[in-house]
């Protein structure tokens, strides 16, 4: 069986399709964040071959500070939206490996706590993706040069901060089992009603 035939077989089987998406999607989120994170490290490494590494890190951190703020605000926003209590927001506070942080306290039943853990910890991936897409759309559709430059800058700043820290991943993993169940149900319904 070729890969193409396997994909068609999985897509053609409603329950199998929903199960595969539910099993893979939560880990694709982490994988994309890691790829973006290591891409940023690779660019910083290449730049540090020509410029002092401390200057490179400071340039990256301070040049792309809007991405840091949007990253932290996305954590706070999705924590709040999912019902968690946001206890602290530091938009640009340099600490060890981090440039900011958001603290939240879970509230509600096991289902809500799982969603809070998943969405609040992976918020830079979800909100960041929407912001980067919006900036890309603006850059390709707006004719005002300064606005295109501003949107491009914000999009690049956010792109390099669409990452998850080790702490984010630990919190995210706690909610993954219930998140997988939710993805399975949503995919199953979308497939049964012919949406996907």
Image: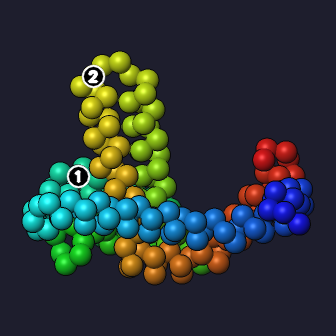
Residue at 32 percent of width and 35 percent of height: 151
Q: Earlier in the sequence, mark 2 or mark 1?
A: 1
Residue at 58 percent of width and 66 percent of height: 28
In the rendered structure, find residue 152 and report the number of the disc placed on it: none
Element at label 1: loop
Which of 187/21 is in front? Answer: 21
- Lateral position of residue 196 relative to residue 91, left or right: right
Which of 191/144 is in front? Answer: 144
Residue 167 at x, y = what percent?
38, 79
Residue at numbered disc 1: 64
Which of 24/174 is in front? Answer: 24
Q: Tell me which corner region of the image, top left, top right, bottom left or bottom right, holds residue 15.
A: bottom right
Residue at numbered disc 2: 145
Q: Tell me which corner region of the image, top left, top right, bottom left or bottom right, holds residue 154.
A: top left
Examine the rendered structure and indicate whether residue 75 appears above or below residue 128: below
Residue at 29 percent of width and 60 percent of height: 43
Element at label 2: helix
Examine the rendered structure and indicate whether residue 94 appears above or below residue 36: below
Dot 2 surroundings within 10 Å: few (below 14), some, or many (20 or more)?
few
Dot 1 surroundings within 10 Å: few (below 14), some, or many (20 or more)?
many
Residue 102 at x, y = what percent?
31, 68
């Amino acid at each position: 069986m070729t890969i193409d035939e396997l994909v068609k077989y999985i897509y053609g089987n409603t329950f199998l399709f929903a199960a595969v998406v539910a099993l893979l999607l939560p880990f694709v989120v982490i994988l994309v964040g890691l790829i973006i994170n290591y891409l940023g490290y690779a660019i910083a490494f290449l730049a540090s071959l020509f410029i002092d590494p401390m200057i490179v890190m400071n340039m990256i951190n301070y040049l792309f500070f809007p991405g840091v703020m949007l990253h932290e605000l996305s954590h706070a926003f999705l924590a709040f939206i999912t019902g968690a209590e946001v206890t602290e927001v530091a938009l640009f506070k340099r600490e060890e490996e981090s440039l900011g942080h958001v603290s939240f306290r879970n509230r509600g039943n096991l289902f809500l706590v799982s969603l809070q853990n998943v969405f609040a910890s992976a918020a830079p991936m979800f909100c960041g993706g929407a912001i980067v897409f919006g900036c890309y759309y603006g850059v390709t559709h707006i004719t005002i040069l300064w606005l295109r430059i501003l949107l491009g800058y914000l999009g690049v700043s956010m792109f390099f901060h669409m990452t998850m820290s080790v702490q984010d991943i630990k919190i995210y993993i706690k909610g993954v089992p219930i998140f997988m169940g939710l993805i399975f149900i949503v995919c199953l319904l979308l497939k049964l009603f012919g949406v996907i």
